[in-house]
Image (cartoon, grey):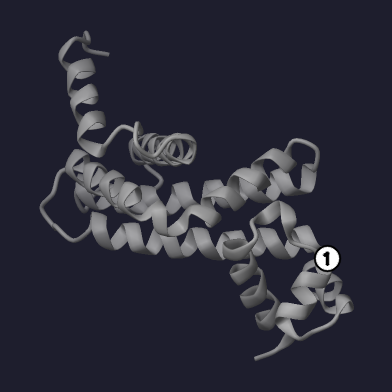
Amino acid sequence: MGHREQLLAAARKLLEDKGYAHITARDLVAESATNLASIGYHFGSKAGLLNEALGVVFEEWTDQLAKVALAEPDATPIARAHLTWAAVLRNLADNRMLVLSFAEALAQAERDPALRAQLADLQDHTRTRVAAIVATSFGPEVTADDPRCRAVASFVLAVCDGFALQWMLDPVRTPQADDLLQGLAELLARSAPF
């Protein structure tokens, strides 16, 4: 394993152990058994390394959620969303520090345009992957770039992010996936056609 991979593995571990805001470059060097120059050479900065590690985490989560969402081949888009939300809620406790790391990165992005752009690209990449999953529910003639798929993917991501933030504040009072499904059904039942 080269320095790049060692640094990414170290950043991933430290995001789980310390959270985004409390990781120093020296922590990364000690955990990876590399050197300070390697961080700049491979990632440009400590933030660049941590953000790429967050990207790895997002990819892992998206892969896990894709397996859940696609487990039932004949499920409707709403059923797949419900399965995804339930899986997110089940896994938050095991990923608390990673959720905190993401929240800390978001807070720092306000003052760091490069970080903001990197996180925005990461969010868009995740939305595109979710849109591809949504497209499988719409049939073989629909592709991930269909605006309907992107709209559903945006909604699913907004709910997942909202669940994560609410859960960080109060796990006991965070709504459950069934609550959201019931609320969505109530809104649809009382809405005029678009």
Q: Is residue 114 left or right of residue 64?
A: right
Q: Looking at the picture, does residue 76 appear above or below residue 101?
A: above
Residue 53 appears at what percent x and percent y? Answer: 62, 65
User: Which residue corresponds to the image point at 24% horizontal and 53% vertical from the top-left?
Assistant: 136
- Give the quadrant of residue 42: bottom right
The answer to whether residue 143 is seen in the rendering is: no
Q: Amino acid at mark 1?
A: Gly
Residue 39 appears at what percent x and percent y? Answer: 81, 73
Residue tagged by mark 1? 44
In depth, the one of 76 and 101 nearer the eye is: 101
Q: Quadrant of the N terminus?
A: bottom right
- Give the quadrant of residue 66: bottom left
User: Which residue corresponds to the image point at 14% horizontal and 58% vertical from the top-left?
Assistant: 73
Residue 47 appears at what percent x and percent y? Answer: 76, 58
The answer to whether residue 109 is seen in the rendering is: yes
Q: Looking at the picture, does residue 167 appear above or below residue 69?
A: above
Q: Secondary structure at mark 1?
A: loop
Q: Is residue 140 left or right of residue 45?
A: left
